Amino acid sequence: MIIIVIIVLLVIFSVVFSFVSPWTYVPIAADWSEIDLLLTATLWITGAVFVAVSLFMAYALYKYRQSAGNRADFEPENKRLELILAVATSVGVIAMLAPGLVVWNKYITVPDDAKIVEAVGQQWSWAFRLPGEDGEFGLVSTHDIYETPFGVSASDPAGSDDIIIDDNELHLLLGQPVKMVLRSIDVLHNFYVPQFRAKMDLVPGIVTYFWITPTRTGTFEIICAELCGVGHSQMRGYVVVDEKKEYNEWLAEQETYAKLVANERNDNVEYAQNSE
Ligand SMILES: [Cu+2]
């Protein structure tokens, strides 16, 4: 009997807690309300199944409890019950997964007017690259990764105007669709801004992407969402969504690849002169 009471209390507590809990989605800051819809639909479907299965279990425990004259009956096959369970489970699973495919299709179909931004992850920090005025990234090579900033090849002219942001703060323009191109130079990481809802793994050796349109200004935390070593929990950064004026001011302060390389060369020359 006590187990029946515990099951029923567990169901009541879970349902009430879901409605009164202070922990809910952080306010959204990107054009991905579909993802919230999917999360909510999944919660409702799995929640309904949880309540139905738990209450049925409590009912069965009560109805078929041990008592004088009750005997268990062995029933290895029940076509009707199996059919009902198979159909109901299929409908539930399809209802959860099918809308996800539609949203996933949108998630990987980047609009033509999207600007590209690259995020580079490494244990345990973030850095970023913008393509500069030509709108194109310079080629990168793993052979150059410790030689030049971000491994951008010195021989590719498209790379000289790339803007290298060797800092954990990235600014994005409000309302401008952005294709986030992701690269890792060591292990698996995951670029996740909870307010954007969108996230994606960074996989060493391949370039992954997703896209977002920021819908409100503010500073949002980037959290690495893939366990990537002892410093994983410290692997944080910030995305600042700006209005045009603030964005352009920030952009003007960033250095291009060509300038960074020139500065480095000057530093080396100065160092050599000073140590003579
Ligand atoms: Cu990480």
Image (tube, rainbow, N blue to C red):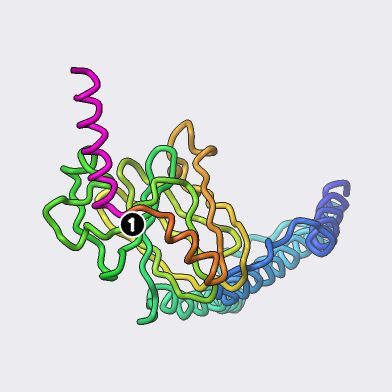
Residue 50 placement: quadrant: bottom right
Residue 261 placement: quadrant: top left
In this picture, residue 59 sits left or right of residue 78:
right
Query: Callout 1: 10 Å neighbours few (<14), some, many (20+)?
Result: many
Does residue 274 belong to the magenta stretch? yes
Task: Check the image and report above or below for 58 versus 31.
Answer: above
Position in image of residue 258 (x %, y %)? 24, 52
Q: Check the picture and name the quadrant holding the C terminus.
A: top left
- The amino acid beneath tag 1 is Ile
Position in image of residue 79 (x %, y %)? 56, 76
Task: Check the image and report above or below for 78 versus 273.
Answer: below
- Of residue 121 and residue 36, the one placed in the foreground of this image is 121
- Of residue 62 and residue 155, the one placed in the foreground of this image is 155
Q: Tell me which segment is drawn in magenta.
A: 256-276
- Of residue 198 and residue 174, the one placed in the foreground of this image is 174
In this picture, residue 19 sits left or right of residue 159:
right
Position in image of residue 221 (x %, y %)? 58, 52
Q: Main secondary structure of the magenta part?
A: helix
Tell me the residue at 35%/52% (across/down).
255
Q: Count every numbered label the image shows and give the total.
A: 1
Q: Residue furthest left?
A: 155
Circle 1 SS class: strand
Does residue 212 belong to the magenta stretch? no
Residue at mark 1: 163
- Of residue 268 and residue 97, the one placed in the foreground of this image is 268
| Picture quarter with ligand 1 | top left
Observer able to see residue 89: no
Task: Check the image and report above or below for 119 versus 32.
Answer: above
Tell me the residue at 68%/61% (across/down).
26
In this picture, residue 249 sits left or right of residue 68:
left
